[in-house]
C-alpha cells in the first residue's frame, strides 16, 4: 500500500432516530437525519466516469492532474539542479531534509485548518504561496547558481505549505461528490496521479535536456497557478451543517452519525472509540516503515550490487509499480458497491506482502513483475480502504483525521530509510525484502481479526 496516498474509520456515538429534515444547499438535497440524496448536481453513482458530471469534480480533477505533473518535474529537477551547481550528495540530503521535516509536521496543522476553514481555501492558500516560492527558485536557477542556504530557505516553507495542502486535498473529495460517487472519484483521482507521475517524470527529462532545470521549475510554478485557478472556479458547498454530511454517511454505517441531540463527538473521543481508525493508523505506520526504506534504500542497493543493474533498471522497476498502480486504481474505481470489500483489502495486502518478499528472486525481470503485480494490488486496496474511511469520518473531523493519517504515512519515512540503511550495510539489502513482506503480512492478518476492517 502506498504511503503517498495514501484512508478510514468508524463512527462512534449511536445516533438517535429523528424524522428526516430536507435542506437544500447549493443544488444538493441533503437529509439531515437520513440519507444524502444527490440530485442533478450530484448524479447517483453508476459508473466510474459518473463523477465527471459534477462540475466541481471536473475542475478539481483537471487542476490536480496538472499540479501532479509539476510535482514530477520538481522531483527530477531539484536534485539535478543541486548536484550540477556545485552541491554534493550530502548537501542534497540537507535540502531534502529541510523540505521533508516541515512537510510532515505541517500535515497536522493543515488538517486542523481544513476543519476550521474549508479544504478548498487551505488548498488555495497553499498553492498561492507555493507558486511564489517555486517562481523564486526558478528565477534563482535561471539566473545563476543558488547556494545551499537559498535552497534550504525556500525548501522549508515549500515543504510546510505542501504538507498543509495534503490533508486538505484528501478532505475535499467527500465535500465534492455524493457517497455513491466517492469510490469512483477516488479511483479517478489516483489514476490521474499515477498517470501524471509517469508522464511527468519523462517530460522532466525532455525539458531538462532541451532547456535547463530552471525551466522545469518554472513550468512547475505555472502548474501551481493552474491548480489555484481551478480551485478558485469551484463552487464552495455550504458546510452549514457538518451534520448533513455525517447523516449522509449514516446510511452506509448507522453508527456514522456523530450528532446526538445537538452534540458532536470530539477529535480525541473519536480516536479513542473508533476501532476502524485505530486499525488503519496502525496499518499506515507499518506500511510507511516497510515501504520507505525498501524502495528508497534497499531496492537501489539490491539492483546495483546483487543484481548488477543500472540506474535505468531502477527507473523501469519503479515505472512498473506506477503502471500497476494505474491499473489498480482503474479497477477499484469500477468495482462499485461490491460487498466484502474488507476481504478484498485483506487479499490485496497479502499479495503486496508476497510480492515484496519475492522481489529479490528472479533478477531484474522478476523484480519488474513483482512491482507490477504489487502496484495493482496496493492501489486497489488503498482506494477501497480510503473510501470506507472517508464515508465514516464525521464531517467536522475530516481534515484532522486526514492530517493524522498523512502524518503517520510521511512521518515514519525518516526512520524507515535510516533503519534500512543500517540493516542493508549490516546484512545486505536482499534479506530486508522477505522480512518486510512478513511484517506487512502480519499487520494485515491482525487487521482482519478486527470486525471494523472486515466489514467495510
Image (cartoon, helix red, strand yellow):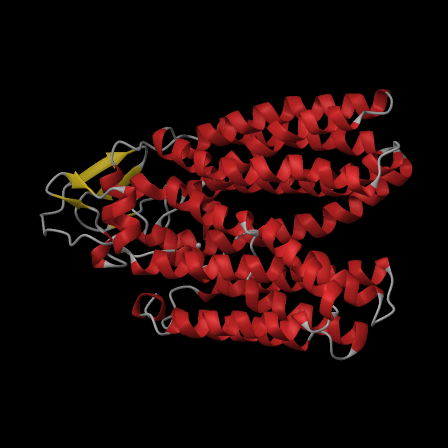
Please say if 269 is above or below 1: above
Quarter of the image for residue 95 reads top right
Quarter in which the N terminus is drawn: bottom right
Q: Is residue 9 visible?
A: yes
Image: 213 above or below 174: above
Most distant residue in the front direction: 426
Q: Nearer the viewer, residue 341 or 95?
A: 95
- Front one among 222 and 448: 448
Q: Position of residue 63 (x, y in %)?
A: 58, 37
| Vertical placement of residue 86 versus 272, above or below | above
284 displayed left or right of 198: left
User: Which residue sits at x=39%, y=34%?
Assistant: 112
Give the quarter of the image for residue 155: top right
Q: Give how far across and how far down residue 353 sits, in percent.
A: 57, 73
Q: To which quarter of the image does residue 9 belong?
A: bottom left
**Which residue occupies 44% across, 42% down?**
403
Residue in the image at 30% along x and 60% along y:
275
Q: Position of residue 177 (x, y in %)?
A: 40, 46
Front one among 414 and 2: 414
Left/right of residue 235 with respect to residue 417 in the rendered view = left
| Residue 439 placement (x, y as % from top left) | 54, 71
Q: Is residue 25 left or right of residue 46?
A: left
Query: Can the viewer see residue 330?
Result: no
Return the residue nearer the eye: 364 or 23. Answer: 364
Q: Quadrant of the C terminus?
A: bottom left
Amino acid at each position: 500500500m502506498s504511503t503517498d496516498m495514501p484512508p478510514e474509520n468508524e463512527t462512534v456515538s449511536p445516533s438517535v432516530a429523528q424524522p428526516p429534515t430536507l435542506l437544500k444547499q447549493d443544488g444538493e438535497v441533503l437529509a439531515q437525519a437520513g440519507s444524502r440524496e444527490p440530485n442533478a448536481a450530484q448524479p447517483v453513482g453508476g459508473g466510474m466516469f459518473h463523477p465527471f458530471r459534477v462540475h466541481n469534480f471536473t475542475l478539481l480533477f483537471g487542476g490536480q492532474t496538472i499540479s501532479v505533473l509539476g510535482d514530477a518535474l520538481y522531483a527530477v529537477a531539484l536534485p539535478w539542479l543541486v548536484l550540477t551547481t556545485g552541491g554534493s550528495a550530502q548537501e542534497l540530503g540537507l535540502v531534502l531534509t529541510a523540505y521533508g521535516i516541515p512537510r510532515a509536521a505541517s500535515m497536522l496543522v493543515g488538517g486542523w485548518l481544513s476543519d476550521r476553514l474549508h479544504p478548498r481555501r487551505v488548498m488555495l492558500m497553499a498553492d498561492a504561496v507555493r507558486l511564489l516560492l517555486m517562481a523564486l527558485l526558478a528565477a534563482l536557477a535561471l539566473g545563476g547558481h543558488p547556494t545551499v542556504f537559498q535552497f534550504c530557505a525556500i525548501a522549508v516553507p515549500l515543504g510546510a505549505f505542501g504538507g498543509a495542502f495534503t490533508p486538505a486535498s484528501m478532505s475535499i473529495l467527500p465535500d465534492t461528490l455524493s457517497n455513491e460517487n466517492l469510490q469512483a472519484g477516488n479511483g479517478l483521482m489516483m489514476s490521474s496521479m499515477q498517470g501524471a507521475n509517469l508522464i511527468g517524470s519523462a517530460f522532466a527529462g525532455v525539458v531538462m535536456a532541451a532547456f535547463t532545470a530552471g525551466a522545469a521549475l518554472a513550468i512547475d510554478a505555472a502548474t501551481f497557478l493552474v491548480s489555484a485557478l481551478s480551485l478558485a472556479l469551484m463552487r464552495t458547498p455550504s458546510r452549514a451543517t457538518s451534520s448533513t454530511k455525517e447523516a449522509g454517511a449514516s446510511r452506509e454505517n448507522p453508527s456514522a452519525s456523530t450528532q446526538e441531540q445537538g452534540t458532536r463527538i470530539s477529535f480525541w473521543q473519536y480516536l479513542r472509540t473508533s476501532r476502524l481508525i485505530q486499525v488503519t493508523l496502525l496499518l499506515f505506520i507499518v506500511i510507511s516503515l516497510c515501504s520507505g526504506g525498501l524502495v528508497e534504500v534497499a531496492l537501489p542497493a539490491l539492483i546495483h550490487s546483487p543484481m548488477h543493474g543500472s540506474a535505468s533498471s531502477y527507473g523501469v522497476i519503479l515505472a512498473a509499480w506506477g503502471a500497476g498502480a494505474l491499473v489498480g486504481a482503474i479497477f477499484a474505481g469500477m468495482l462499485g458497491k461490491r460487498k466484502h470489500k474488507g476481504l478484498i483489502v485483506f487479499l490485496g495486502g497479502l499479495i503486496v506482502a508476497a510480492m515484496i518478499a519475492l522481489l529479490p528472486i528472479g533478477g531484474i525481470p522478476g523484480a519488474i513483475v513483482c512491482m507490477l503485480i504489487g502496484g495493482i494490488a496496493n492501489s486497489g486496496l488503498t482506494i477501497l480502504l480510503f473510501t470506507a474511511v472517508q464515508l465514516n469520518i464525521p464531517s467536522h473531523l475530516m481534515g484532522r483525521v486526514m492530517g493524522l493519517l498523512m502524518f503517520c504515512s510521511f512521518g515514519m519515512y525518516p526512520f524507515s530509510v535510516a533503519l534500512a540503511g543500517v540493516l542493508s550495510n549490516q546484512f545486505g539489502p536482499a534479506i530486508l525484502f522477505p522480512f518486510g513482506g512478513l511484517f506487512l503480512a502480519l499487520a494485515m492478518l491482525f487487521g482482519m481479526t478486527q470486525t471494523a476492517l472486515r466489514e467495510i
